[in-house]
Image (tube, rainbow, N blue to C red):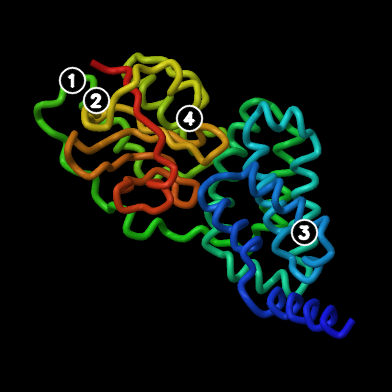
């Protein structure tokens, strides 16, 4: 009996004050984009009384649900995912320990918030008003104090000089895009009053007579795939947050140079970003497509 008490005391102390492998794995798998694994493992920990002391399983279940719900197919099978995420994260944030947890995971939450803002545009465009309303509630109640910072070293104040060797339509794409620098980000926006990411690319290409699908995922699907070594200014660059293509920009750098794009960023509107020095965009870089010759 005495040895049992000692054993359980040691287990409790190691969980309460030391690093716990199962909790550490939640962060590691989330950072790697393994959201289904995070969801399953956090559920298992929530069912284990030994982890009642920690809010991390509840927190990771909440944010993994947010990422998984951005996949249309997954969301149709889990219709309560967004509402459940809102409940979990609101509960975590309401506690003192939860406030400290949110502060400690600021970087992670910045990325999740950025993904949510981009996804909200798709929901509004698709008239999914119910999901859009819950995402708005999440942004206002859970993520209201999370400030998406300037993109840091990924920002480029001045766009690179357009090469004189570009074809006429590629040069025109770059010129039209750069004319929109500074226009704000607007959910489902597709005009100089405000753009979301795919609204911006659609607008620019329409100006040279090319009609693009409205969603970023469809723009990638219907374009001609291009290898990174062959990409040219005016081509499109796509990003995947782990639940599908979630962002698109227009390449402004030449092949062989550090990758730069002009795009509608949720934090700053139309800007030029150096993808090669941005941790956020590098982690999500998916592929390239062209509609140009």
Q: Which residue is mark 1?
A: 168
Q: Where does label 4 land, which residue?
A: 199
Question: Residue 59 has which mark?
Answer: none
Left or right placement of residue 263 versus residue 7 in this view: left
Q: CA distance from mark 1 to mark 3?
A: 52 Å
User: Eyeballing the image, is 173 above or below 90?
Assistant: above
Which residue is more in the foreground, 24 or 227?
24
Residue named by callout 2: 172
Pointer 4 with pointer 3, Cβ within 8 A: no
Q: CA distance from mark 2 to mark 3?
A: 47 Å
Disc 4/disc 3 C-alpha distance (Å): 32 Å
- CB atoms at circles 4 and 1 under 8 Å apart? no
Question: Does dot 2 land on a helix, a strand or a loop?
Answer: helix
89 or 9: nearer the viewer: 9
Camera-nearest label, 2 or 3? 3
Q: Residue 168 location, x and y as percent?
A: 18, 20
CA neighbours of label 2 inside 10 A, class few (<14), some (14 to 19), many (20+) = some
Where disc 4 sits, the SS reads: helix
Q: Earlier in the sequence, mark 2 or mark 4?
A: 2
Which label belongs to residue 90?
3
């Amino acid at each position: 009996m005495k040895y049992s008490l000692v054993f359980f005391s040691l287990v409790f102390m190691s969980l309460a004050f030391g690093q716990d492998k199962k909790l550490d794995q939640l962060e590691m798998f989330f950072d790697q984009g393994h959201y289904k694994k995070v969801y399953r493992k956090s559920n298992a920990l929530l069912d284990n009384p030994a982890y009642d002391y920690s809010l991390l399983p509840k927190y990771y279940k909440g944010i993994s649900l947010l990422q998984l719900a951005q996949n249309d197919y997954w969301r149709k099978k889990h219709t309560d995912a967004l509402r459940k995420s809102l409940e979990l994260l609101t509960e975590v944030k309401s506690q003192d320990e939860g406030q400290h947890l949110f502060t400690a995971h600021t970087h992670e939450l910045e990325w999740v918030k950025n993904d949510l803002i981009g996804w909200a545009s798709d929901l509004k465009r698709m008239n999914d008003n119910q999901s859009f309303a819950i995402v708005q509630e999440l942004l206002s109640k859970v993520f209201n104090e999370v400030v998406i910072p300037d993109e840091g070293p990924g920002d480029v104040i001045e766009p690179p000089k357009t090469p004189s060797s570009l074809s006429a339509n590629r040069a025109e794409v770059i010129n039209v895009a750069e004319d929109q620098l500074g226009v704000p980000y607007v959910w489902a926006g597709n005009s100089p009053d405000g753009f979301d990411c795919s609204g911006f690319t659609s607008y620019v290409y329409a100006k040279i007579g090319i009609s693009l699908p409205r969603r970023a995922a469809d723009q990638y699907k219907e374009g001609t795939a291009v290898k990174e070594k062959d990409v040219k200014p005016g081509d499109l660059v796509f990003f995947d947050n782990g639940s599908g293509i979630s962002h698109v920009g227009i390449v402004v750098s030449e092949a062989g140079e550090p990758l730069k794009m002009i795009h509608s960023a949720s934090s700053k509107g139309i800007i030029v970003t150096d993808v090669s020095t941005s941790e956020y965009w590098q982690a999500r870089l998916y592929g390239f497509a062209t509609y140009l010759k």
